[in-house]
Image (cartoon, grey):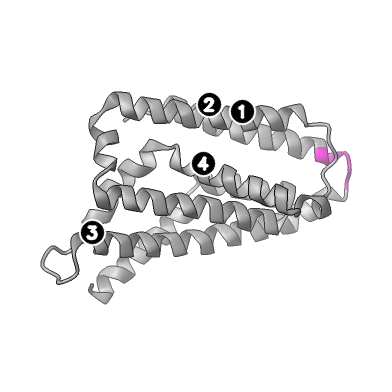
Amino acid sequence: MEIINLLVFGGICILLAFSPGPDNVYVMTIGITKGKKAAFVTTLGLASGVVFHTLAAALGVAVIFQSSPMAFDILKYLGAGYLFYIATQAFIHRNDVLELSSLNEDKELRSLYFKGFIMNILNPKVSIFFLAFLPQFVNANLALSITNQMILLGFIFLCVTVLVFSSIGFISHIFGKKLLEKKSFSKVLNYLTSFVLYSIALKLAFSQQ
C-alpha cells in the first residue's frame, strides 16, 4: 500500500482517537479512579474489540448490522444493558474507598479487560463505522487483496488506539492519584464512574442506524 495513503490514514486515526467519545472517556475515568495499569488493561480490552470490528468489516459481517434494523437493535440493546449493569454496580459501591494498590490484582485486571472488550464489540455503530471508513483507503488495483488491506488498516487503527488511549489513561492517573489522597473524594469518583457509564449506556440505547 502507498506510504502517503497509510500516513493520511494514520493521521485521521489519531484525530479520531483523541476526539471525545465513549471509549476514551471511559479510559480517562478508569485512569482517574483505578490507576494507569488499570487504564492500560482497559485499553487493551477496547483494542481487542477493534480486532473484532476489523474482521467483521473485512469479511462483510458488518453489512448485516447496516442492512438489518433488527440485528442492529439487538446488539445495541445488549450493549446498553451491559453498560447499565456495570454502571449500577459502580453506583452500589459508591461508598467504597478506592485504594489503587488493591485495584491491580489479576482478577480485577481481567475484569477490566473483559469490560472494555464487551463494551466495544456490543456497539454496532463501530462495526458500521469500520465498514464505511476502512474501504476509503483500500486500492483494488494492488496485488494485496482487499481483505488483507482492510486487516492491515485495522491493525494500524488498533496501534493508534492503544498509544492514544494509554496516554489518556496515564495522564488521568497523575491527577487521579493526587485526588485520591483525599479520602472524601473517593465517593465523588465512584459517582463519576457510574455517571459516565450510565451516560454511555443511554447514548448507545438511543443511537440510530
Of all residues, the one furthest to the front in this rendering is: 107
Residue 72, relative to residue 164: is it above or below?
Answer: above
Residue drawn at point x = 53 percent, y = 64 percent = 163
Q: Name the residue that disc number 4 marks.
A: 118
Mark 4: few, some, or many residues within 10 Å (few <14, many ≥20)? Answer: some
Q: Earlier in the sequence, mark 2 or mark 3?
A: 2
Q: In screen coordinates, is 46 left or right of 104?
A: left
| Cα–Cα gap, marks 1 and 2 | 6 Å
Q: Name the residue that disc number 1 marks.
A: 85
Q: Name the residue that disc number 3 marks.
A: 147
Residue 25, relative to residue 11: is it above or below?
Answer: above
Q: Which residues are magenta?
A: 182-186
Of all residues, the one furthest to the left in this rendering is: 141
Where does residue 19 sit, x and y in percent of width and height? 47, 50
Q: Name the residue that disc number 2 marks.
A: 81
| Cα–Cα gap, marks 1 and 4 | 12 Å
Residue 88 highlighted magenta (yes or no): no
Amino acid of disc 1: Tyr
Q: Earlier in the sequence, mark 3 or mark 4?
A: 4
Q: Earlier in the sequence, mark 4 or mark 2?
A: 2
Q: Earlier in the sequence, mark 1 or mark 4?
A: 1
Where does residue 140 sit, x and y in percent of width and height? 13, 63
Question: Are circles 2 and 3 on residues that touch, CB within 8 Å?
Answer: no
Amino acid of disc 2: Gly
Mark 3: which secondary structure?
helix
